[in-house]
Amino acid sequence: MGFQQGLSGLNAASKSLDVIGNNIANASTVGFKQGQTQFADVYANSLNGSSAGTVGIGTKVSGVVQQFTQGNISTTNNPLDIAINGGGFFRMSTNGAITYTRNGQFQLDKLGNIVNAQGAQLTGYVANAAGVLSTGAAAPININTADIPPAQTATINAVMNLDSRKLVPGTQLPVTIPPVITPIAFSPTDPTTYSSSTSIAVFDSLGNSHVVQSFFVKRDNINPAPPTPPVTIEWDVFATVDGVLIAGAGATANSVTRLGFDNLGRLSNVTPQFSATDPRATTLTVPVSTGAVTPINTTLDIKYDFTGTTQFGSDFSVSKNTQDGYASGKLAKFNTAKDGTIVGSYTNGKTAVLAQVVLANFTNPNGLQSTGDNQWIETATSGNALVGPPNSGALGTLTSSATEDSNTDLTGELVNMITAQRVYQANAQTIKTQDQVLQTLVNLR
């Protein structure tokens, strides 16, 4: 029996050295999970059971268990590299066959699919043209590299302060009570005919840019105050598009609207109003000649919202001047957020959700079957895959432009190698000793 015990010990130590060697060989393999050899003692069966003095007949390898502990996160220069920080596996599809991996080294193939080195496609939730994710069944992720379509400007939001100290253009100096005013016709090329101006680019239905410049002309003097100060101080607004004056429905010829302020400097009315529900906005009708067809062939109607505009005794200033249109744009880059959302950035400054990476977890990850190439497949022992977005439940978060290193402890494995070597030598010594005992027995006369 001594030979059998020593032989089983040699086999077990050899298997342990194989596992250690595999761990060391994969110390630089992204997403690798080191294995651990587990042993069990062996006893011979007996009809009457084992007595207290029964001697075992050796050892055996009861299993090689992978350690699914977290590896270090290392940054890379590839925006498609993704590291999992926490639980879960990437869900991969190869012609419908599903595998799982912790190796997040990905790239784009010629069709725009996110794939690994073996050509397996990363799966997740795909987004429609409006950027809404379809959170049903996970599907292979395809990055749509088509241009984002333009959006026509619908609203301009302008918040500014008009200087109440400004005089009506044409007021003669020194100012008398009542002031003497020589009417001056507005001209966008004559700065003496307006008090202040600001500009913004708007976009038609084809994404063509048009520069709208607004001019503000005061209509009432309050400094010095006339004998009966006006209840409302008014300013006419004129506008040009690409340098051409546009006519509007304001109170003064060619003005687009008139702004009224109360004696506290608050905007009290806009004439004409955009609608009864938007008393601080007016309609700006912008002529276009670029082939844009909406809303009609030759004009672009824009809601010009002045909500928040004031008239205080301070310099003219613009605190907000935005619009909601944009030109078409090409996909410049994309990155993956912690929750797996892949967001594309376009050359027109817009962003859009393209997809969301999903993760899968298992009740018993050690029940997964390794197929090589850092991939596992589901088994009855592992349980069914629990699929969901990152950072939900027991699933970890994602880090873009990074990979998860092998969790092999190289120093520990080298020490384990020395131990396994000593175990192998000791078992070989037991066989040698048993051989010497047997030789002594054979030589008895």
Image: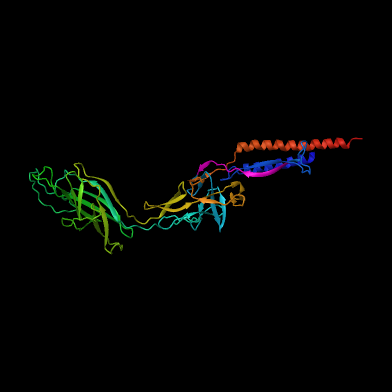
Residue 244 occupies quadrant = bottom left
Residue 400 screen position, x and y as percent:
48, 46
The one nearer the camera, 406 or 380, is 380
Q: Is residue 329 left or right of residue 213?
A: right
Q: Quadrant of residue 95?
A: bottom right
Between 286 and 275, the one nearer to me in the picture: 275
Most frequent secondary structure within the magenta stretch: strand
Magenta-span inclusion, residue 352:
no
The total number of labels drawn is 0
Q: Give the percent coordinates (x, y) of residue 252.
A: 15, 55
The segment highlighted magenta reads: 59-75
Image quarter where the C terminus lies is: top right
Magenta stretch contains residue 73: yes
Relative vertical location of residue 152 with respect to residue 164 in this rendering, above or below = below
- Residue 302 place in picture, x, y as percent: 27, 57
- Hey, which residue is sitting farthest right in the picture? 445
Q: Position of residue 303 (x, y in %)?
A: 26, 55
Compared across the picture, whether 91 is left or right of 167 comes to right
Q: Quadrant of the N terminus?
A: top right
- Residue 385 is left or right of residue 10, and the answer is left
From the viewer's perspective, is residue 2 above or below residue 362? Answer: above
Residue 277 in which image quadrant: bottom left
